[in-house]
Image (cartoon, helix red, strand yellow):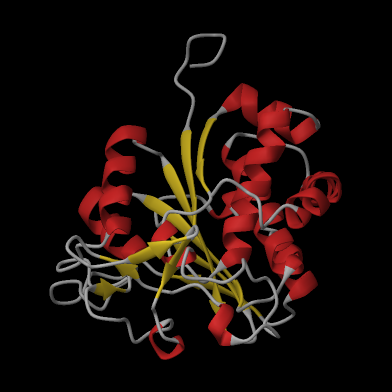
Amino acid sequence: RSSSGTRQPTFLVVGGVHGNEVPGMLGVEALSQYLRRGEGRLARHLLEHCRVVAVPCINRAGLLCCEKRLLEHTHPMTSWGTRCCPQPGSKLAYGDGRVWGIPPHQRGSDPPPGWQDPNRGWATNHTFVKQHVSELLDWVQPDVAFWNHDWAPTKSMLCLTCPNLPQEAYEGIEPIFKRAHPDFILAHCSDPVTGDGSENSMPLVLLHERGLQSYLLETYFMGGGESARCHFEALLFLLCRHADFTFPTAELLREVGVAADATMPSAVAGVEIAPW
């Protein structure tokens, strides 16, 4: 609650639903660092006006399949983490801080036995990601959630699964995405779930099951540090808008740029040692 005793809005920010999408994880980690330090105009505003729960990597098993935390598409696929997530009963070969034995051709959309894409098949999805998400939603009870991905080929996207939120909450965000990804898509996704929901994305199913309003931030696959910066800036922009930062859009864009300049270099440099 705020100092006046009124209920503050609560926001859940999640990265790493897919274990090979490091820029989204790093953007969430950078946001966590920025808010923990509590320095800067926007950090002070958010800490005063809302509650932010940030989870940089919710699919740790998928991430631990990587040889290193990749930011660039030039690295070989053998180094990548794994898109999917294990389900209870799966056997993992774990040692030296890594999950071993997942061949490259099973690190994308074709999962190994006992693993599943945690963003799909919600009706039959028993992944640890689904369990963690369900527990987080029960505990945090967020007003809005933000899911950070890094898979959209050749473009970036802000997917709006939030039919009850005003356009003013995200209006003007395009320059943040277009700086690194000129082909930007603003998509609306709040259609009814089809069939048993197996082909629908997790945010859409959660909208219809729980009424959860959410954003899905998607950057160009393996776009590097610029993609991570895009996640950080877009998250900060959206959070401030939802936390009633009422200054003009141009001023807000300028402030998120200042925050990124101060935060992103150390976050990118520390990607290999970040606790997630």
Q: Residue at x 74, y 35 (%)?
A: 42
Residue in front for this viewpoint, 179 or 6: 179
In the displayed structure image, the side of residue 85 where residue 256 appears, left or right:
right
The answer to whether any part of residue 200 appears in the image is: yes
Residue in front for this viewpoint, 179 or 76: 76
The residue furthest front is 96
Q: Which residue is drawn at 54% across and 84% down?
A: 78
Q: Where is residue 263 in the image (x, y as percent from the top left)?
A: 79, 46
User: Residue 207's quadrant in the figure?
Assistant: bottom left
Residue in front for this viewpoint, 33 or 48: 33
Q: Residue at x 48, y 9 (%)?
A: 5
> Number of numbered discs present?
0
User: Residue 3's quadrant in the figure?
Assistant: top right
The residue furthest bottom is 105
Q: Which residue is drawn at 34% across and 87% down?
A: 110
User: Residue 46's quadrant in the figure?
Assistant: top right
Q: Where is residue 73 in the image (x, y as percent from the top left)?
A: 67, 82
The answer to whether any part of residue 59 appears in the image is: no
The residue furthest top is 4
In the displayed structure image, the side of residue 86 where residue 27 appears, left or right:
right
Residue in front for this viewpoint, 35 or 108: 108
Q: Position of residue 245 (x, y in %)?
A: 68, 35
Q: Position of residue 179 (x, y in %)?
A: 79, 70
The answer to whether residue 268 is above or below residue 12 is below
